[in-house]
């Protein structure tokens, strides 16, 4: 109890300094949580686009980005004929621009695609999709930021397209995107006869392994991955995740430096007290324990405050109309645990030098000059 | 046979310094110059001498807080600093009282006193019982939950005395324990000190400038310029 009180006493003795350290960790944790959660959400949404009513994605082997993947349309036709396949939908991705909006995702899809079949059509008739090559359907948010409605014409790239429908999806990318008939999209991007991916729905999920081996044997240039496999292995996702953790890690590093500074000051200003404890039988390990205990307390308090701040921030972001569908506020328990653990490790790392210094304090030196 | 001998006339040396040398600043300041000293169990010894003559250094060496350049320091028959667990020495065998009370101001009197018991891992109930006993004997029972800032100088030094005796050490090393007190408080604390060490059979080695107090110890050892000049039996 007294051991704990020695820890708490020193934190209370320098309240402002302790609060600044807690705030440093809290902001770092909040930043890490926010960045990681937003990116996880974005990755989830992107995966959602690919796995919309499908279980397997087929794309070009060894391609660095799905936008560069070329899958021959003939492959989709052949695969669709395989006995274990319920349906195979080719999808062509591309980035287009419109007046004042340089980056909009365009989806080239067939009329049978789940995005068209199952979306909530706010206006227009899904039966009319792909009737004309200059028809497009807009996601709700795309229609909003482009300022167009049903029946209007919208400039995309060098062409003018007719808006025949507006649909709502829960996915931010799709909601901010443009849907074009596959053939029109192929012509637009000069990729006649090819798509970026083929999304596959099997009659029986258990056939996934045999399906993948068939793709491997019959289309050596293509690769088939189940949705979860794709999310784990897609290099872009891995880069994004690594970036998110690196950004958060940098934040925590700064927080750790704050703790180190606080703990160094804390040790320097009570050399005499440490000497008294040593004279009264405290071992070096016990002295180190006090210093690590203080930094751990700061880290845990900071982590809790950071989790609360980060959660509030994520909810606030979700309320911003422009970010509708892009921010997923679901904070996953593993992420939360990792963030707390990292904060704790940061605190301990920040206390390494101060603790080592405190453990080396020679009582006789500190007490000689009374 | 002196008064510290047992029924068979045996005495036991608990503190021994043999040809002890100690310097600071890489030999620039020679503090102890071949000190030889012994104290037997239950004896009260006063170290007198001018400032800088090596009194405090000798106490620190007996407490294992510092190491001699040359010579040997033994406590209870074991050589300090060599083949010896210094933590055991500080936790169970010696207690320290300094000129300044050296208490932790943010803790209460009781918490300050319990620090050595926490360090030594002594059972909480045992520690509390010992605290109550010492507090009662030093007249501090009513102040146990008071913070150090609320205590008078005399009370603080009595608290320091309690803390030094919490783990029932057999040796008390006191470095001018009344040096920062007024005459009245000084006398009161010293009386208490003698009473406690006599009651528990503790060996007291006390550095002091106050010859009046020193003469009330069993033995007075005069130090000058890093050497022991004479032993005077009071």
Image (cartoon, rainbow, N blue to C red):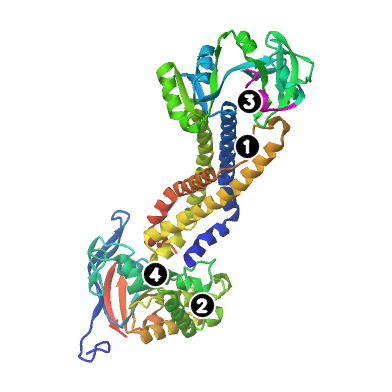
> How far apart are the two marked residues, 4 and 2, measured between alpha carbons?
29 Å
- Residue A68 visible? The answer is no
* Residue A76 location (% of width, % of height): 53, 16
Residue under label 3, please give it: A114
> Spatial distance from mark 1 to mark 4, Cα to Cα?
51 Å
- Residue A328 circle label: 1
SS state under label 2: helix
**Residue A72 or residue A87, whichever sits in front:** A87
Q: Are marks 1 and 4 in contact (CB under 8 Å)?
A: no
Circle 1 Cα neighbour tier, 10 Å, few/some/many (<14 / 14–19 / ≥20): many
Relative to A14, B13 lies left or right = left
Queried whether the magenta region covers residue A111, the answer comes back as yes
Front: mark 2 or 1? 1
Pointer 1 chain: A
Q: Is label 4 or label 3 in front? A: 3
Closer to the camera: disc 1 or disc 3? Answer: 3
Q: Position of residue A111 (x, y in %)?
A: 65, 19
The residue depicted at 48 percent of the width and 76 percent of the height is B159
Disc 2/disc 1 C-alpha distance (Å): 65 Å
Q: Which residue is mark 2?
A: B154
- Residue A97 position, x and y percent, is 67, 15
Q: Secondary structure at mark 3?
A: helix
- Crowd rating for badge 4 (residues with CA inside 10 Å; few <14, some 14–19, many 20+): few
């Amino acid at each position: 109890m007294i051991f704990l009180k020695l820890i708490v006493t020193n934190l209370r003795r320098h309240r402002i300094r302790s609060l600044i350290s807690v705030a440093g960790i809290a902001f770092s944790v909040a930043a890490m949580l926010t960045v990681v959660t937003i990116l996880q959400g974005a990755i989830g949404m992107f995966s959602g686009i690919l796995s919309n009513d499908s279980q397997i994605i087929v794309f070009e082997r060894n391609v660095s980005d799905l936008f560069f993947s070329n899958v021959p349309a003939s492959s989709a036709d052949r695969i669709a004929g395989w006995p274990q396949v319920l349906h195979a939908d080719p999808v062509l991705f591309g980035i287009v621009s419109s007046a004042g909006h340089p980056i909009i995702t365009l989806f080239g899809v067939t009329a049978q695609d789940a995005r068209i079949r199952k979306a909530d059509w706010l206006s227009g008739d899904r039966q009319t999709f792909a009737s004309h090559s200059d028809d497009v359907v807009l996601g709700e948010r795309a229609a909003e930021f482009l300022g167009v409605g049903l029946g209007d014409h919208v400039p995309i790239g060098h062409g003018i397209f007719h808006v025949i429908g507006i649909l709502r999806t829960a996915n931010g990318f799709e909601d901010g995107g443009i849907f074009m008939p596959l053939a029109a999209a192929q012509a637009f991007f000069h990729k006649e006869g090819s798509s970026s991916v083929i999304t596959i729905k099997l009659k029986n999920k258990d056939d996934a392994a045999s399906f993948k081996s068939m793709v491997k044997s019959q289309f050596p240039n293509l690769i088939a991955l189940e949705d979860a496999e794709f999310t784990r292995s897609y290099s872009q996702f891995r880069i994004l995740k690594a970036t998110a953790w690196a950004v958060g890690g940098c934040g925590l590093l700064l927080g750790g430096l704050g703790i180190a500074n606080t703990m160094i000051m804390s040790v320097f200003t009570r050399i005499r007290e440490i000497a008294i404890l040593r004279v009264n039988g405290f071992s070096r390990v016990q002295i180190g324990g006090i210093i690590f205990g203080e930094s751990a307390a700061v880290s845990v308090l900071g982590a809790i405050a950071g989790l609360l701040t980060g959660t509030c921030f994520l909810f606030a972001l979700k309320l911003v109309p422009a970010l509708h569908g892009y921010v997923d506020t679901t904070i996953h328990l593993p992420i939360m645990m990792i963030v707390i653990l990292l904060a704790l490790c940061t605190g301990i790392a920040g206390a390494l030098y101060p603790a080592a210094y405190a453990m080396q304090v020679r009582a006789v030196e500190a007490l000689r000059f009374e | 046979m002196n008064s510290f001998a047992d029924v068979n006339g045996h005495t036991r040396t608990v503190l021994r310094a043999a040809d002890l040398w100690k310097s600071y600043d890489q030999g620039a300041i020679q503090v102890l110059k071949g000190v030889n000293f012994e104290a037997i169990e239950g004896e009260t010894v006063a170290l007198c001498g001018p400032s800088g003559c090596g009194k405090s250094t000798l106490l620190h060496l007996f407490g294992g807080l510092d190491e001699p350049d040359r010579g040997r320091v033994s406590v209870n028959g074991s050589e300090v600093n060599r083949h010896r667990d210094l933590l055991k020495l500080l936790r169970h065998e010696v207690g320290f009282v300094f000129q300044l009370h050296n208490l932790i101001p943010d803790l209460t009197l009781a918490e300050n006193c319990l620090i050595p018991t926490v360090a030594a891992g002594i059972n909480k109930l045992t520690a509390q019982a010992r605290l109550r006993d010492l507090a009662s004997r030093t007249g501090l029972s009513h102040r146990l939950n008071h913070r150090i800032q609320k205590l008078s100088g005399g009370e603080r030094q009595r608290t320091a005395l309690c803390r030094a005796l919490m783990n029932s050490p057999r040796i008390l090393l006191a470095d001018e324990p009344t040096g920062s007190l007024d005459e009245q408080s000084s006398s009161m604390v010293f009386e208490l000190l003698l009473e406690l060490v006599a009651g528990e059979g503790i060996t007291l080695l006390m550095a002091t400038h106050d010859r009046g107090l020193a003469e009330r110890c069993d033995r007075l050892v005069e130090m000058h310029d890093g050497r022991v000049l004479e032993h005077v039996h009071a």
